[in-house]
Image (cartoon, rainbow, N blue to C red):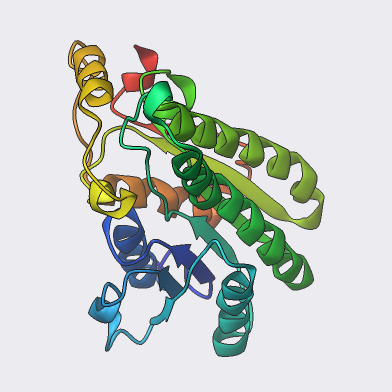
Amino acid sequence: MGKRLEGKVALITGAGNGMGEATARLFAAEGAKVVAVDIMEGSLEKWKGNENIISLYADITKEEDIEKMVSTAEKEFGKLDIVCNIAGINDLCYTLEDTTDEMWDRVMDIDLKAPFRISRRAAKTMEENGGGVILNIGSYAAYRGNHGPSYTAAKHGVVGLTMSLAVGLISKGIRTNCINPGGTFTNIEEHSGGNYHPEGMGMLIDITGKFPTNGYAQPEDIANAALFLCSDEAKHINGAILPVDRGMSCC
């Protein structure tokens, strides 16, 4: 049985830790050439010596860095088949009254605007190559109001972005799907810039703690779903919003 991504080139953001790291490792093991992107200095050193992975430090909120990400894939590997928009932060469950304009803008820029910009740039290259796959990471919070307003709105926007791209790009041979993780063991709190808001986090724990489906996933659980959606096995799946949340979204 051949490797499921043999001959594919993937661009993965947030590849220095958590879901992005797990996805980069799995994709490379399945035969893909990977451009692993992260902003945190030192986070990509783990990929040294892996002939299937090129590390690239970049800021996904900057258009010049997005151009560098895509052009690196083109220059080093000759094409781009897959984009996984995994890098993100959350709003640390900040309540409406404590959500500043600065926090709102930062969450929106990283979690929604960046995937839009990356997809827009990558789609040009994918179309020239005959097609590809865009995979976005949303959240269980996209459909529930128990997180802070900026994160909930951004991830709801990611779902809408995915649906629009699925319709608008399929004629160019580009599929677009989204994974909505539930609770997953990552260090997103560190990347999001502080500690969880005690009132907002208390509400989230109170609500989800009553769910019979409650439970945390490992980053590899998200990576396994990403592998399927980005492989040719899912060639007829477009516009899917896949919950990987142990059933939390049913509650």
**Which is nearer the eye, 38 or 96?**
96
Residue plotted at (55% across, 61% down): 61
Residue 206: image location, x then y, percent: 20, 14
Residue 23 coordinates in the image, percent (x, y) = 36, 59
At 79% from the left and 45% from the top, the residue drawn is: 168
Q: Is residue 12 visible to the viewer in this orientation of the structure?
A: yes
In the rendered structure, the answer to whether residue 194 lies left or right of residue 54 reads left
Residue drawn at the location 56% of the way across and 85% of the way down? 77
Left or right of residue 147: residue 197: left
Please determine whether, in this image, residue 193 is positioned above or below residue 53. above
Query: Residue 180: horizontal and vertical position, in percent?
Result: 43, 35
Name the quadrant of the N terminus. bottom left
Residue 52 falls left or right of residue 205: right
Q: Decide which of 212, 121 is in the foreground and name it.
A: 121
Relative to the observer, which residue lies in front, 179 or 98?
98
Q: Quadrant of the C terminus?
A: top left
- Position of residue 78 relative to residue 194, above or below, is below
